[in-house]
Amino acid sequence: MADTLPDALGPLLRAARQRLTEAGVNDPALDARLIVEHFSATTRTQAIADPERKVGPDAVAAIDAALRRRISGEPVHRILGYREFHGLRLSLSPETLEPRPDTETLVEAVLPFVKATAERQGECRILDLGTGTGAIALALLDAVPGAVATGVDISQDALTTALRNAGDLGLAGRFKSLQSDWFEKVSGRYHVIAANPPYIPTQDIENLQDEVRDFDPRKALDGGADGLSPYRIIAAEAAGFLDLKGIIAVEIGHTQRDEVTDIFSTAGYGRTAVSGDLGGNDRVLVFEHRF
Ligand SMILES: C[S@@+](CC[C@H](N)C(=O)[O-])C[C@H]1O[C@@H](n2cnc3c(N)ncnc32)[C@H](O)[C@@H]1O
């Protein structure tokens, strides 16, 4: 049984950090801060300016429970129930991937095109395939008032969460959700087709970090035998849904640049950009169709 937690904010933070450190959690200071701030509804500034501030017994109990979950291996954002993406707070649910900072690379890669299209044509239509929390679509809608987006997912749970996120962010009027197996139920033409599809080869899933394998949904990870199945489907079918001057942007695994480029080249696309993530890995490819 762990020690009882103190009820003053500063000592509570220190005790939380110590518990996570002793348990070997990866980034104990950050996770302790996120948990304490969230469940005590306090801010970093309050912890610094008023460390003796009292935290109520219900909040201390919630922090205690959250620390136990973290120590048993649950990712901190699953415990909090949300994650920040491109400056937006996105709620998570069992069938949504936790949006990752690497995926912000995709948002940045297409943002100038989305802005320019919206300015030129008064509207930019975005199709976000495998939308999950709605991360990509909602980040683009938030940045470009002239954009509208359809978020497609096979998971109804994910779409419910994406719609909730759109509502919470005041973007519901420009975001539609569609349950579909990739393009199966999609109609219309889009200036941007964006996708962060599942791209882990099936046999590699068992070797992923525990936090990913055990808490991110399998449907969001498993890209088939070689990890490339979704790219083949998207490349084969996208032309029917892409505006004449539209672009496709896909996130990739860091070793998949050449294979994914070949898949799109064979389907009639030319690659116009490769973007690296924060770690310097190839992370996003952008294509246009050679109609
Ligand atoms: C890697 S996650 C990406 C989620 C989100 N776009 C992000 O970047 O955080 C892939 C998403 O594709 C969805 N998905 C998997 N297979 C699908 C299919 N056949 N048709 C549509 N969506 C699919 C999953 O449910 C999951 O939400």
Image (cartoon, rainbow, N blue to C red):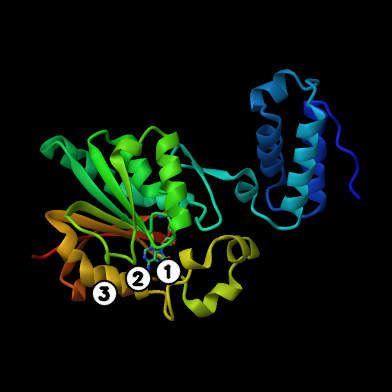
Residue at horizontal 86 percent and vertical 32 percent from the top? 6
Q: To which residue does mark 3 refer?
A: 263
Q: To which residue does mark 1 refer?
A: 199
Separation of disc 1 and disc 2 at Cα? Answer: 8 Å
Q: Is residue 8 above or below residue 235?
A: above
Left or right of 166 in this view: 175:
left
Left or right of 129 in this view: 220:
right
Residue at horizontal 20 percent and vertical 72 percent from the top? 265
Residue at horizontal 61 percent and vertical 50 percent from the top? 78
Q: Is residue 279 visible?
A: no
Q: Amino acid at mark 3?
A: Ile
Q: Is residue 282 visible?
A: yes
Earlier in the chain: of badge 1 and badge 3, it is: 1
- Confirm or deny contact between disc 1 and disc 2 (CB under 8 A): yes
Where residue 191 appears, as percent x and y from the top left, is 18, 51
Element type at mark 2: helix
Where residue 242 appears, as percent x and y from the top left, is 17, 58
Q: What label does residue 230 carry, if any?
A: 2
